[in-house]
Amino acid sequence: MKIGIVLYPTFGGSGIVATELGKALAVKGHEIHFITYSQPVKLGELRKNVFYHEVVPSDYPLFEYTPYEQVLTSKLVDVVKYEKLDVLHVHYAIPHASAAYMAKQILQTQGIKIPFITTLHGTDITLVGKDPSFEPVITFSINQSDIVTAVSENLKLETNQLFKIQKNIQVVPNFINIEEYQMNQNQYYKNRYAPNGEKIICHVSNFRKVKRIGDVIKTFNVVAEKIKTKLILVGDGPERNQLERQARKSKFNKHIYFLGNLKSTKEVLNISDLFLLPSSKESFGLAALEAMACKVPVVATNTGGIPEVVENEYSGFLSEVGNIEKMATNCLTILSKEDNLKVFKSNAFKTAQKYDIEQILPKYEMLYDQLVN
Ligand code: GMT
């Protein structure tokens, strides 16, 4: 099948899921056309059956705001028509679903049929989407999608609560290529960050307010009072400066490392003992799944779709948003006894296996089949 995948190319989870999905479909023999405004982070090498089409917005001086959606729509029309695509799969509602709808209408006038699937990822609904300046367009483009999927039951529920959705939203959870996350611990880095056998706590995100990374540092401060621990923060974003200031005030500042964005997180995750995800909202929590794929248990908040991904008291612990004491106690329960840590590590991996790409990919293939045939 020839599939066009529209995505955000940056470090966000939606872009990562879309890229990995396309790569895996290409391995299975489908022809994949990625369409976005710059090279997706996880793409780049020459791959069989993979093509990349860059959307280049015009810089005509009349435009105060570059009309990305129109340029994307024109690109979709072009790629569908000349590459003879069978289906479009757009990740993130804004503006991808509305651009796909528009492209579909244009192509229809030329006698070309192109169905599209919209996958909702979370922030497009719970943060940006409910903003009144987007709401009518989102409601319309979700309802006009041929198939709509959401990455968790919770996101499905919230979408139905926030918008007037007439379509049945199908839940297809995010996934991970477990095999790709397996590697031996890099001893150089283990010794570099934990030279005296300290436990390593890790957090990976895009450093936005919703991630509450301040709570990571606060929780770490409590844990570090009790056991020798290091904190590694991976990622970058608007909150970073303020977080660095917060870390500098901590008594344990010299045990906190800000690494910035990394193309691949598996090296860091594989030397970590625990992953902290104290977000105020998370439709799924792909970062937690990546950690569990590296046998790292997760201490997180019981918000959004996280309880569907992290099993409380099994692959980690869940507690209320902002409850630092509880999160610190949970970290200590996992980290202070080697036996406990071993059990949680093994459980985390078992949980991650349920989300292996092998389990999830056929679900998307079935949906494509449904539309094309
Ligand atoms: O919040 C992020 O990390 C970025 C955001 C995105 O749009 O890429 O992530 C959302 O989609 C991910 C992939 O489906 C989910 O794992 C994240 O939970 C979700 N983020 C939120 O809901 C805040």
Image: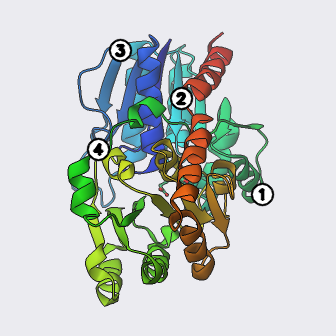
**What amino acid is at disc 4?**
Pro
Foreground disc of the pair 2, 1: 2
| Gap in angstroms between the C-alphas marked 2 and 1 | 29 Å
Please state the horizontal and vertical placement of residue 221, each as a whole percent of the image.
43, 82
Foreground disc of the pair 1, 4: 1
Residue 57, numbered label: 4
Q: Residues within 10 Å of mark 2 (few under 14, many from 20)?
A: some
In depth, the one of 276 and 134 nearer the eye is: 276
**Picture residue at 41% right of the left edge, 62% below the top:** 202
| Gap in angstroms between the C-alphas marked 4 and 2 | 34 Å
Foreground disc of the pair 3, 1: 3
Judge whether 109 appears above or below 265 on screen: above
**What amino acid is at disc 3?**
Asn
Residue bearing the label numbered 1: 161
In depth, the one of 290 and 189 nearer the eye is: 189
**What amino acid is at disc 2?**
Ile
User: CB under 8 Å between callouts 4 and 2?
Assistant: no
| Gap in angstroms between the C-alphas marked 3 and 2 | 18 Å
Nearer the N terminus, badge 3 or badge 4? 3
Foreground disc of the pair 3, 4: 3
Q: Secondary structure at mark 4?
A: loop
Please state the horizontal and vertical placement of residue 82, each as a whole percent of the image.
37, 14
Residue bearing the label numbered 3: 49
For this view, does 23 lie left or right of residue 119? left
Asked if residue 177 shows in the view, the reply is no
| Gap in angstroms between the C-alphas marked 3 and 4 | 26 Å
In depth, the one of 308 and 17 nearer the eye is: 308
Nearer the N terminus, badge 3 or badge 1? 3
